[in-house]
Image (tube, helix red, strand yellow):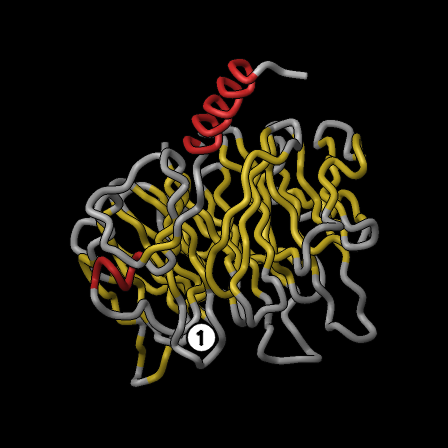
Amino acid sequence: MLSNKILFKFLILSLIVFGCKKKNIETNEQVSSISNGYLVLNEGLFNQNNASLTWYDVKTGNITSDVFQANNHRGLGDTGNDMIRYGDKIYIVVNVSSIIEVLDSKTLASLKQIPMIANNKSKQPRNIIGYGSNIYVSCFDGYVDVIDTSNFQITKRIKVGDNPENLCLMNQKLIVANSGGLNPPTMDSTLSIIDLNTNSEIRKVTIGMNPGNIVKGLNDNIYVISRGNYTNVKPSWKLVNITTGEIEKTFTENVLSIESFQDSLLLMNMDNQALNLFSMKRNAIKQNDFISLSGFVNPYSIQFSPVRNEIYISDANGYVNQGYVSVFDSYGKLKNKFKAGLNPSKIVSYE
């Protein structure tokens, strides 16, 4: 048996260790300055006007469940579709509210709401990407808007295909997925290639029905998911040469989304409920079950941060409940998991 003196020391040490352990404390208090953490865009529910931002502080483990509301004293809007950090600002696409919300990246104070309205109708903004002095926003009305980051003015509307969504940069070109998602079963099947020197479409490439997720590959290649029509046209994903317009390879795995990861791809494969590791050099799977998805209720999005060398997987958790974000290291080991809002989809990481 332990002596009373040894037992007493053991109890004191235990109290110190457990007393110092971080707890995830949820708060709705204003955050004056953010660093070393994760900013999460929660889409909310369509037509419920409940999109939000969650802030997770790595140092303290504290969660600000709606930091936009706390810092700006109003809601973010209806259906947060996309978010990027570009320069010293955060740009958020709020789809149903038809705005681009511009925030200071350090304080999350709102600097500008850019209205996305044309001819008294919503442009239905979808996705966003930055290049040079502009940000580019795909709009479901068939255009990509060019917005000057110095004055937040829309300087040009580039006509593309039907219901453009996902965007990808490559070789001073912007590749746009024209989904035709509002026109089933006769959806679009093209990618628009935009020359960023002239901000004009230079060609279309036919790749398969309802293109979505696009990822930059090696050389002049991209990988793109064709989602089909959800009935008789099955989804697939393809390797496409944007210079020649040729489909170099077609893959049939049931992949929900793809993400660049070092010299590989992360594939969210719904058949084996895992993130598989895919070699872009060999165009073949190099590791199945790199990260298991069996513990996720509704895997919703994947992202890789080359700055922090981390992988983020969000879980929609039934779509009507608070979701979660899991953080993995580059070896696929779980580092952290924290609660977010309704349908967490985009993560911006801060060092």
Asked if 257 appears above or below 289 in the picture, the reply is: below
Left or right of 77 in this view: 339 = right
Asked if 199 appears above or below 20 in the picture, the reply is: below
Q: Position of residue 12 (x, y in %)?
A: 46, 23
Q: Position of residue 35 (x, y in %)?
A: 30, 37
| Amino acid of disc 1 | Asp
In terms of depth relative to the viewer, which is nearer, 24 or 85?
A: 24
Q: Position of residue 232 (x, y in %)?
A: 83, 74
**How many numbered callouts?**
1
Q: Position of residue 316 (x, y in %)?
A: 59, 61
Q: Residue furthest front?
A: 4
Q: Quadrant of the C terminus?
A: top left
Q: Quadrant of the N terminus?
A: top right
The residue under the point 44% across, 42% down is 23
Badge 1 crowding class, 10 Å Cα cut-off, few under 14, some 14 to 19, many 20 or more, is: some
The residue under the point 43% across, 37% down is 22
Res 220 visible? no
In terms of depth relative to the viewer, which is nearer, 274 or 117?
A: 274
Asked if 271 appears above or below 244 in the picture, the reply is: below
In terms of depth relative to the viewer, which is nearer, 139 or 160?
A: 139
Q: Residue beneath label 1, please?
A: 141
Res 71 visible? yes
Q: Residue furthest bottom?
A: 120
